[in-house]
Image (cartoon, rainbow, N blue to C red):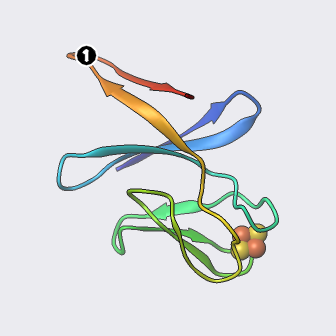
Amino acid sequence: SVLMFKFGPSPAMLIHHADGTWASLSAVCTHLGCTVQYEPQADRIHCACHGGVYNAYTGANVSGPPPKPLRKFNVVVGENSVEVSRS
Ligand code: FES
């Protein structure tokens, strides 16, 4: 599942993968700045603007025009909370 949220002025994603791991990534495409979307059925992140694809665990740019990875944030999972922070 995915939660889209604003991290400061920019959109970001908190992804809970089917294997139980968490990832939090910037949702701003590194190509021209469109907002990317998590696609759970393919377990990937897709940018509809020009077809960019990113790894949903690491944010690595996998195919299409994006020149670099999505920014990755730190995730700390507590008993009743999930905390996301920048390093
Ligand atoms: Fe995302 Fe171009 S803005 S692929």
Q: Position of residue 32 (x, y in %)?
A: 82, 65
Of residue 84 and residue 86, the one placed in the foreground of this image is: 86
Count of numbered badges drawn on the protein:
1
Residue at x 64%, y 31% (from the top left corner): 7
Badge 1, how many Cα within 10 Å: few under 14, some, many 20+? Answer: few
Q: Judge whether 65 appears above or below 67 on screen.
A: below
Q: Quadrant of the C terminus?
A: top right
Q: Determine which quarter of the picture holds residue 64.
A: bottom right
Q: Position of residue 78 (x, y in %)?
A: 25, 18
Q: Position of residue 3 (x, y in %)?
A: 46, 41
Q: Is mark 1 within 8 Å of ligand 1?
A: no
Of residue 14 and residue 30, the one placed in the foreground of this image is: 30
Say which element carries label 1. loop
Q: Which residue is mark 1?
A: 80
Q: Determine which quarter of the picture holds residue 74.
A: top left
Identify which amino acid the numbered label 1 is placed on: Asn
Residue at x 34%, y 25% (from the top left corner): 76
Residue at x 77%, y 32% (from the top left corner): 9
Q: Is residue 83 left or right of residue 85?
A: left
Q: Is residue 1 left or right of residue 3?
A: left
Q: Quadrant of ligand 1?
A: bottom right
Q: Is residue 41 left or right of residue 24?
A: left
Residue at x 59%, y 61% (from the top left corner): 69
Q: Is residue 17 left or right of residue 86?
A: left
